[in-house]
Amino acid sequence: MRDRFLTGLIGYPIAHSAAPAMHEQAATALDAHCHYQLIEVAGAGRDDLRAMLEGVRRLGFAGVNVTFPYKEAVVDLLDELTPDARAIGAVNTIVVDGTRLVGHNTDATGFARAIAPLLATKSRGAIALIGAGGVGKAIAFALAGLGAGEIRIFDADAAKATELADQLQGGVAARSVATAVDGAAGLINATPVGMLPNRDTPVPDTLLHPAMWVADAVYSPLWTPLLSAANAKGATVLTGRDLAINAAADAFALFTGMTPPVAVMGNAFDAVMAARYSPSA
């Protein structure tokens, strides 16, 4: 087993990412060393992504994470996909296995663990999912795996919402925002809307009410405009914290072969958030 690991993240924008702190401090806690490199590239086309992935293959990386907007774009550039990643059609973790690049999806496993306690305590009902991109796909499959009965999907690109609904089939339908949220027990934002510097909300405040729960995949900031509005309405809210930590822990295990110290990764995440959003920051 190696005790030094080169990993990283491909995406844009990613300067806000807490991933370097989580991965590097997790390795330190296990008497190993990890360097987690942010690979921030805007507007990367297919050839750009292919070149970056070839660098990952050749430069000694154990693997890389992939985030917005490239989770779907990298899929057919890889040598292999796990069955779950293939079904979802999006990849957020790429492991270097010899000379092969293998795509995984730890958004799905991470979100399933994050949302399970909330679903266990709330009455089951329709769930409105806003966003059918890479993270939206992972969340939809996680919900289906947890036995969510009815999933209503909205995306600004209606064709993407319909495609995801067709992938999942039973109990899933593409909707407008209003019809997705109307009467829903829960609401999940799986878009980058609300991620700094953006301060918009994907759902009008008028559609929020105290009887629902609202979750956001965005964690920069933890309290997005959507969650702040939902909290003000008296709804139960779930920030992107646990999704981020769980997804990172699963990726760390894949990169290193080590059992991730989840508490250490959580503390690292919290420290990054506290430093970034403290009054003096």
Image (cartoon, grey):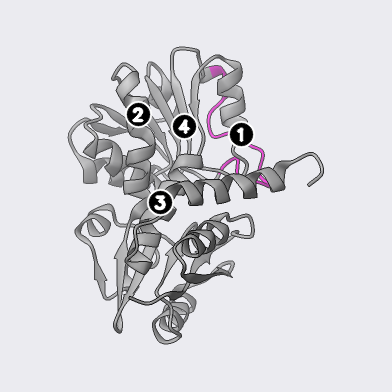
Residue 209, position in %: x, y? 50, 14
Whether tag 2 and tag 3 are in contact, CB under 8 A, the answer is: no
Question: Which residue is found at the position 42% from the left and 75% from the top?
Answer: 3
**Where on the picture, by quarter, is residue 89?**
bottom left
Marks 1/3: CA–CA distance? 19 Å
Residue designated by label 3: 247
| Image depth: mark 1 or mark 2 in front | 2
Residue drawn at x 61%, y 17% as measured from the top left: 232
Q: Is residue 205 magenta?
A: yes
Q: Can you tell which mark lies on residue 223?
A: 1
Disc 1 or disc 3, which is closer to the eye?
3
As helix, strand or loop, the secondary structure at mark 3 comes to helix
Drawn side of residue 74 relative to residue 169, left or right = right
- Mark 4 vs mark 2, CA separation in Å: 13 Å
Q: CA distance from mark 4 to mark 3?
A: 16 Å
Amino acid type at circle 4 is Ala
Near mark 4 (Cα within 10 A), the count class, few <14, some 14-19 or many ≥20, is many
**Counting residues from the N terminus, which is met first, the one under dot 1 or under dot 3?**
1
Q: Secondary structure at mark 1?
A: loop
Give the amino acid type for the residue marked by disc 3 in the picture: Ala
Residue designated by label 4: 215
Gap between marks 1 and 2, in whole Å?
20 Å
Q: Nearer the viewer, residue 245 or 262?
A: 262
Q: Quadrant of residue 70?
A: bottom left
Give how far apart the Cα atoms at labels 1 and 4 are.
10 Å
The answer to whether residue 157 of the structure is visible from this angle is: yes
User: What's drawn in magenta, residue-wise?
Assistant: 193-206
Q: Secondary structure at mark 2?
A: helix
Distance Cα–Cα, label 2 vs label 3: 16 Å
Q: Earlier in the sequence, mark 2 or mark 3?
A: 2
Query: 26 above or below 218?
Result: below
